[in-house]
Image (tube, rainbow, N blue to C red):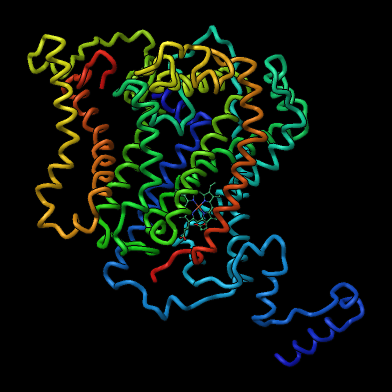
Amino acid sequence: MNEERKGLKEKITNSDIWRSIFRHGYEDTGRRYTLQILQNVWLHLHPPRVSRHALNFRFTWCMGGITFLMFLVTAVTGVLLMFYYRPTAEYAFRDVQYLEFDIPFGMLLRNMHRWAAHGMVISVMLHMFRVFLTGSYKKPREFNWAVGVILLLVTFFLSFTGYLLPWDQLAFWAVTVGTNMARATPVLGHEGPFAPQDITQSNDVRFALLAGTIVGPSTLLRFYILHCVAVPLLASVLMALHFWRVRKDGGISGPL
Amino acid sequence: MEHFLALVTKPDNVPILAILFLIPYFMWLSYRQARQTDITGVPSDAELNDKVYVWPYLCRNEFICAIIVMLVLGVWSIMIDAPLEEPSDPTKTPNPSKAPWYFLALQEMLVYFDPWIAGVVLPGLIIAGLIAIPYIDINPKGKGYYTIKERPFALAVFSFGFIVLWIVLMIVGTFLRGPGWNFFAPWEYWDPHLVVPLTNVNLSYLFGIRSETTANFFGFVVVAGYFSVGPIFYLWKRNSSRFLQELGLVRYIVVSFLFLTMMALPIKMILRIFFNVKYIWVSPWFNI
Ligand code: HEM
């Protein structure tokens, strides 16, 4: 029976049709597995081998990877959204409406972008929680934890700058409330304690963030550029550093 | 109640519903593993040197995980539409105005502290404190596995901060704060005209102090006294505690300062909720 199947398999893999499609067979060896990782530009981020517990969902919760996946989804859907969106007070809201009602799959596109962004915020918080619970920030991973904290902030900031772009009531007031506190920055905000005389509403930190004294058209443009260019670039650089350090620090932590 | 259901099922609040399930699930998952380690001991070297090839074993897991997550995201995106309200109008302030859900713990802190503390100093200290964690936690044990026995203090402090002061406050801010940022139980109607009598008084007033200068001095003493609990404890235990000696003075100061600052939030919450205390320290320049 087994012999028979083997014979059949050989017959198929030796046939002219099969060999016209696959140039060579797949060797079932460790060398082959290693090369598979090393020679693939997308996979070579990985080490060739990892300890067994690193595969375990119960250990990592997969949350770092899910955060990265959500980032990729927002990057792809975000680029598509940019084709239909103009960051000006006249057009922004109407472009979103147009996207929802007249672009094929426009609503789905917008939903995926928004929910992936929210998913990223959830998964990054859970990732941090898992890294803490397993004590994975301890030597030699102290610095990568610090990189992670910055990534956490960057994730919040990405999500927050994007929140303004639909330019509806929800967006406008959430950003108004969220940036109001900057008024009270000590020394640098015009309502903060110890603010010098010449710090006013139109030159304090809140003004720098909003490009105005209230959320307005220039805020929209500023948040748009931060959201679509500056912060994603920063996030990508930091993620590259983060992943590189995971490997250089000895791979996924374990009891050693 | 109906309006509460409407609130809970608002599209932008779905992530919070997810968190309500995810956090308990992962706490349970990690607790089980921690208990097992604590009973059977840390895995041996032999188990650790057990390495597997990334291709196909890890790549396969990543692939399956990605497919499942994309399926969930796809279903979520088909079922629930992203919200789009009326065009923005600076003259129409909604009541309540809320920041995005992940900032609601910060907005919730505004109830208890002035904006410069709640909005600037405390967030800054949260970030600084998070970055400081690896440098102030010198316990070499519990690295790379779940355990409770080997690092109870670290776990208790972080979990309290993360679960109670971040996640729970976020949920309260989303579901239980209505017009005027007043507290409403789920079954209560969000009355925008609700009048809440402002009966809060300063701590100095409760102690019968009426003069401003004395009140200022009193506030200073209370706050300084609170933060000197750290150094006093150090001086008292320095000689008898091996732990404190290993920690060292600088690390100890950072740990105690961050810890006391974190605990200031629940303390102020209790003072406000049960004793109607407005400020602890009123000075001509700032109030705490
Ligand atoms: C954009 C955000 C982030 C991404 C994409 C990301 C991604 C990852 C990935 C894929 C891993 C491999 C292990 C795993 O999946 O758990 C990892 C490990 C790690 N991450 Fe992150 N991360 C992010 C944010 C953070 C944050 C906020 C922290 C902590 C404050 C952090 C600290 C760490 C540490 C210390 C490790 C090593 C863990 C170990 O060796 O067990 N990361 N990260």
Residue A91 appears at what percent x and percent y?
Answer: 72, 18
Q: Is residue A225 visible?
A: yes
**Depth check: B188 or A121 in front?**
A121
Report the number of discs: 0
Q: Is residue A1 visible?
A: no
Q: Please identify the quarter of the rendering in which residue A253 is found.
A: bottom left
Quadrant where the C terminus of chain A is found in the figure:
bottom left
Quadrant where the N terminus of chain A is found in the figure:
bottom right
Q: Is residue A18 above or below residue A71?
A: below
Residue A254 appears at what percent x and percent y?
Answer: 42, 67
Residue at 41% from the left image edge and 59% from the top image edge: A136
Residue B164 appears at what percent x and percent y?
Answer: 31, 39
Left or right: B229, with A106 as reference point: left
Left or right: A186, with B160 as reference point: right
Residue at 38% from the left image edge and 59% from the top image edge: A138
**Depth check: B183 or A35 in front?**
A35
Residue at 59% from the left image edge and 60% from the top image edge: B62
Left or right: B241, with B182 as reference point: left
Q: Is residue A164 above or below residue A20?
A: above
Q: Please identify the quarter of the rendering in which residue B208 is found.
A: top left
Q: Is residue B254 above or below residue A52?
A: above
Residue B49 appears at what percent x and percent y?
Answer: 46, 78
Residue at 37% from the left image edge and 63% from the top image edge: B143
